[in-house]
Every structure is written in C-alpha cells, then in structure tokens.
Amino acid sequence: MEKRKMEGTFKIESKVFDSKTLLTIMKIMEKGVIKSVESVVKEGKESMIVSAKDRDGRCLAMKIYKTLHCDFKSRWKYLVLDPRFKNIKKERRAVVNNWCKREFKNLKKAYESGVNCPQPILFKENVLVMTFIGENCIPAPRLIDIDLNKSQIEDIYSKILNEIKKLFHAGIIHSDLSPYNVLILYDQPYLIDFSQAITKNHPLANEWLERDVKNINRYFSKFGLQTKNLNEIIG
C-alpha cells in the first residue's frame, strides 16, 4: 500500500484507538472503493467523518463508528426496539457494527426513495462509505450555520418539509432531525445522520416524527414564518 494511504489511515487510527477499525479501512481500500484517506471532517463522541477519494479523484465520506468510546448498552436497548435488529447480541462490537449496518439500510431506503441524502456505497464492520455532500472535500454548511435571506427562508423550509414527507412515505422516520442534521448545498437541503432513523412500525414512530417536525418548525418560527403541523405536511 502506498505511503500516502498508510499515513492517512494511521492518522485515523490515532483518533479511533482501534486496530480492528484500521484493518477494516485497509480492507475497503484493497477492494478499490477508496484510493486515499484525506482528513477528518468532523468528530463526535461516538463517531467521526473522514474524507476520502476514489480512483477517479471523487470525494467520498467515510463514517467511522467508535468502538471504544460508545455507550453500547444504551445503543443495544435502542436497537432491539427496531424490528429489523431485535436479535442483536448485547456485545460491544456486535452493537456498533449493527449500528453502522442500520444507518446503511436507512440511507439506502431513503436514497432509493428520492430523498436528498448521501448515497450509501458500502459498509463493513463499523465503517460506512457514502457520497460526500459538499465540494472539493469541503462539507456543505449545516442549516444552523448559514444566514438565510428572506427569499430563502420559505423556500428552504418548504423543501425540508418535502424531504420529511418523502422519507415518511418511504417508511422511514429520521428521529433525530434538526438544523444540525441538514446540510445546504446550492439552496437544496440534504438530510444526514440516519443512524437513529426508524421504520414506521416502530412503537415510537409517531412520537419521534412529531419531534422531528417540531425541531424544524421551532427553528423556522424564529424568522416569523408560519409553520405547518404534521397533518399538513404528511397529507
């Protein structure tokens, strides 16, 4: 493996502190999906986003779920409520890997249903590879971080509601939607962070859908916009 690749992956290892994760990334590279690892884009308590490039130089996003610093017991309780993952073992790596698998499945369903979101490419163990929302490996800004002018406010709000509606009709509830989980690129909203998304038959689906809508409405109501309730959105 060329030096640049190795340097990039070892930088990731130093942050994740997990040799198995490094091995997983190297296996993904060996498959030819990723040619080089670029830099850390965002790091949270339980996961990090790393930019990478494919053989054609296109930027990809690699989401790495941390295995050493996650509250896997809480995640396990959350996972087993999902009918798709009710038989998961209460073991750290199994929980983390299935959390990754869950986001892949959610993204795949959303993307195939026409929702503006990253296109998932593959997942392996605790690593998810997807398209990069941004330009030149620089991420698009979050909704919370941009200054909307008057003409944008109603337009962006309407578009986000349409994404919620498309997601609902695809049978998925985001469950963690807020101005922090919406990227804006060329005046188009892209929903991200689908790890907590659930199916419509989840016991808390209605409650969490209502919460998603309230989070978005709360943000846009600050601009004096007349917001819509759930029934008006879903139809």
Image: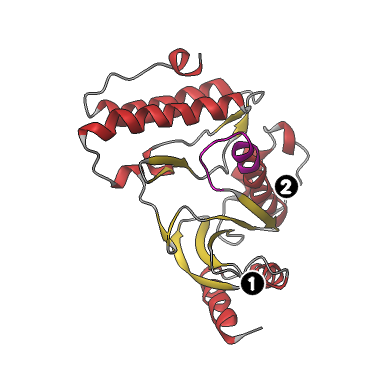
User: Residue tagged by mark 1?
Assistant: 22
Gap in Å between the C-alphas at discs 2 and 1? 23 Å
Give the residue type at disc 2: Lys
Note whether 42 is above or below 111 in the view shown.
below
Is any atom of residue 167 visible in this view?
A: yes
- The earlier-in-sequence mark between 2 and 1 is 1
Is any atom of residue 204 visible in this view?
A: no
Residue 219 spot, x, y in % from top left:
31, 32
Q: How many residues crowd around disc 2 within 10 Å: few (fewer than 14), some, or many (20 or more)?
A: some
Note whether 233 is above or below 173 in the view shown.
above
Q: Residue furthest bottom?
A: 3
Q: Nearer the viewer, residue 170 or 101?
A: 170
Q: How many residues crowd around disc 1 within 10 Å: few (fewer than 14), some, or many (20 or more)?
A: many
Left/right of residue 159 with respect to residue 99 in the rendered view: left
- Residue 69 magenta-highlighted: no
Q: Nearer the viewer, residue 145 or 151?
A: 151
Q: Which stretch did the figure color magenta?
A: 107-118
Left/right of residue 88 with respect to residue 36 in the rendered view: right
Residue 124 spot, x, y in % from top left:
70, 59
Note whether 126 is above or below 113 in the view shown.
below
Q: Identify the residue at image location x=67%, y=73%.
A: 26
Note whether 22 is above or below 133 in the view shown.
below
Q: Nearer the viewer, mark 2 or mark 1?
A: 1
- Residue 111 magenta-highlighted: yes
Q: Nearer the viewer, residue 213 or 93?
A: 213
Q: Residue 32, located in which quarter of the rendered image?
A: bottom right
Q: Secondary structure at mark 1?
A: helix
Q: Which mark is residue 90?
A: 2
Residue 90 spot, x, y in % from top left:
72, 47
Q: Identify the residue at image location x=73%, y=39%.
A: 85
Residue 183 spot, x, y in % from top left:
41, 45
